[in-house]
């Protein structure tokens, strides 16, 4: 009988002894109140809004305690950092993503964003040339046409309070599918586009799996309704992508393209090609990516791009509604660039919209769509702050906290003030203090694409509309947020649009 007690006790003592260095190093780092056995896991109960509130609270705790805090989730040790000096080192040295990302595997397999480093290196190399500025710029006509359509759709719904998120999500899905797959899925015309619906559902399942511990073991998950939902969603997403890939392969074969890998496309003679075509080409055509690898990369781009870009557009409109004097400045700049013309936007216009650029960066600073980036610590890391991260722990870069850290952004760090990013004023105290697109070798490969798409959408909507909501009393904006893989607004950006002018282009589109 005594063995029933002795064996677990021995196992526990050996387990603690093997990890003694981890406990020693962790003990030096501040933490919030922790409970026996579960540590700080109690902070992550509740719905996705409650979880996001806890993550914000922990970030503020790290700000007040020198930039780093720890949280035990049962036997698993995580650190949260809000210090760009430390994070610069972390994001350069810890390249492996946390195990939690494995729940995205049924959907995107080993797609670049969450792939293990051994696979990621090659994938990133193949992806890199597809994101050259010249190629990304060639997508501006797609952004211009689709964003004009968004402005018209919002105009049709205007005059009353509407949830903007579904409209914006359809815009980003249309632009992403057109630039990634080379196909028009017309999500803006079809509110129940199966691709859009299943994308939303599968994102929800992945989030639930991350935060609902009982859904994590594979055998328990297989008994859940969420598993059946995931299978249905993946069938739709994979089926559609596979079909487009096969068609593109056949098309390329009949065009008898050069079957060898060639990363040196003639950019001066470049007309808009989809990322799919580019990846087939850059990976080596017939001897390159398999259809499955192509699907993984293409779905990664679609998922990585759609929600993050849509959230940023939504937050920016919300913030402009809260601060009408800032919206006035955006309107003034748009009028200066477009005058009375109802023409489509061109890439030269994007360069001139400097104040809008500041508004987008300030939006991304206060409301980063990816507020936490989690990496594995595989080998001990000594941080510039002096703390040592033990091997076997995880480190969360709190983008939310870093970008609101008064040490780097001043006492008004929580205030919405796009002027901070004016070219003559922007002297960041540390280059990594702004990290909405991450930093280091695994940073966002699509950040220029994202800026262009966001700017196109905001400029087209705001050229024709005033956006109205509850005006914020102070300079700190309040938007209720939840964590749903990305950070999203709880109310889906309920705002009212009033038409500024009636444009021929809007009626014609
Ligand atoms: C506002 C929009 C966007 C934001 C805020 C954003 C943010 C990020 C962040 C923070 C990461 C690093 C994730 C991590 O370390 O876990 C990332 C990676 C990535 N993003 Fe974005 N992203 C945006 C738009 C896009 C777009 C438009 C694309 C593609 C068209 C894209 C493609 C990717 C890819 C492929 C990676 C993985 C890079 C790698 O691991 O090498 N993103 N993004």
Image (tube, rainbow, N blue to C red):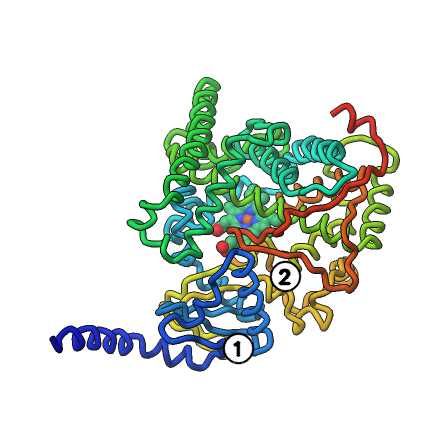
Name the secondary structure under disc 2.
loop
User: Picture coordinates of residue 414 (x, y %)?
Assistant: 69, 66
User: Picture coordinates of residue 44 (x, y %)?
Assistant: 47, 63
Query: Residue at horizontal 83%, vertical 30%?
Result: 503
User: Picture coordinates of residue 339 (x, y %)?
Assistant: 87, 37
Along the line of sight, the residue nearer the viewer: 333 or 41: 41
Query: Residue at horizontal 81%, vertical 37%?
Result: 464
Along the line of sight, the residue nearer the viewer: 298 or 486: 486
Residue that sits furthest to the top in the current view: 254
Rendering quarter of residue 230: top left
**Marking on residue 385:** 1
Residue 256, visible in the rendered structure? yes
Mark 1 Cα shell of 10 Å, populated few (<14), some (14-19), many (≥20): few
Screen quadrant of the C terminus: top right
Side of 34 where 498 appears, left or right: right
User: Picture coordinates of residue 128 (x, y %)?
Assistant: 52, 44
Along the line of sight, the residue nearer the viewer: 449 or 312: 312
Q: Tell me if residue 379 comes above or below residue 449 in the rendering.
A: below
Side of 423 where 98 appears, left or right: left
Identify the mark nearer the N-term, 1 or 2: 1
Residue matched to label 2? 434
Name the secondary structure under disc 1.
loop
């Amino acid at each position: 009988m005594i063995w029933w007690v002795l064996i677990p006790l021995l196992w526990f003592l050996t387990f603690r002894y093997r990890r003694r260095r981890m406990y020693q190093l962790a003990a030096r780092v501040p933490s919030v109140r922790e409970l026996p056995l579960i540590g700080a896991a109690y902070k992550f109960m509740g719905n996705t809004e409650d979880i996001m509130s806890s993550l914000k609270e922990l970030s503020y705790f790290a700000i007040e305690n020198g930039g780093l805090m720890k949280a035990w989730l049962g036997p698993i040790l995580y650190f949260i950092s809000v210090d760009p000096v430390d994070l610069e080192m972390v994001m350069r040295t810890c390249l492996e993503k946390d195990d939690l990302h494995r729940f995205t595997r049924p959907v995107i397999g080993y797609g670049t964003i969450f792939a293990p480093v051994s696979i990621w290196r090659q994938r990133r190399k193949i992806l890199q040339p597809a994101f050259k500025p010249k190629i990304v710029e060639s997508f501006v006509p797609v952004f211009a046409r689709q964003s004009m359509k968004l402005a018209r759709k919002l105009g049709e719904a205007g005059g009353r309070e509407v949830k903007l998120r579904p409209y914006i999500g359809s815009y980003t899905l249309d632009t992403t599918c057109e630039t990634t797959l080379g196909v028009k899925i017309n999500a803006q015309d079809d509110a129940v586009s199966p691709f859009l619906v299943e994308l939303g559902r599968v994102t929800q399942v992945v989030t639930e799996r991350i935060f609902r511990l009982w859904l994590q073991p594979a055998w328990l998950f297989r008994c859940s309704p969420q598993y059946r939902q995931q299978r249905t969603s993946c069938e739709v997403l994979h089926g559609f992508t596979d079909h487009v890939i096969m068609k593109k392969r056949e098309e390329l074969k009949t065009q008898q393209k050069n079957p060898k890998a060639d990363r040196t496309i003639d950019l001066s003679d470049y007309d808009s090609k989809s990322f799919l075509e580019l990846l087939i080409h850059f990976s080596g055509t017939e001897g390159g990516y398999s259809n499955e690898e192509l699907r993984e990369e293409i779905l990664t781009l679609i998922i990585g791009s759609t929600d993050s870009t849509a959230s940023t557009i939504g937050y920016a409109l919300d913030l402009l509604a809260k601060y009408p004097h800032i919206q006035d400045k955006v309107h003034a700049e748009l009028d200066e660039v477009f005058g009375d013309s109802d023409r489509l936007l061109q890439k030269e216009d994007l360069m001139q919209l400097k104040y809008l650029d500041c508004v987008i960066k300030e939006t991304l600073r206060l409301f980063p769509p990816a507020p936490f980036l989690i990496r594995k610590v595989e080998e001990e890391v000594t941080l510039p702050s002096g703390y040592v991260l033990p091997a076997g722990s995880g480190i969360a870069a709190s983008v939310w906290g870093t970008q609101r850290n008064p040490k780097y952004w001043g006492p008004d760090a929580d205030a919405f003030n796009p002027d901070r990013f004016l070219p003559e004023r922007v002297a960041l105290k540390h280059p990594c203090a702004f990290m909405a697109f991450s930093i280091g070798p695994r940073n966002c490969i699509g950040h220029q694409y994202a800026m262009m798409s966001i700017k196109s959408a905001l400029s087209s909507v705001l050229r024709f509309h005033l956006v109205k909501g509850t005006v914020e009393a102070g300079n700190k904006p309040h938007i209720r947020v939840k964590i749903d893989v990305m950070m999203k607004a709880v109310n889906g950006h309920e705002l009212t649009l009033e038409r500024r002018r009636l444009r021929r282009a809007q009626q014609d589109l």
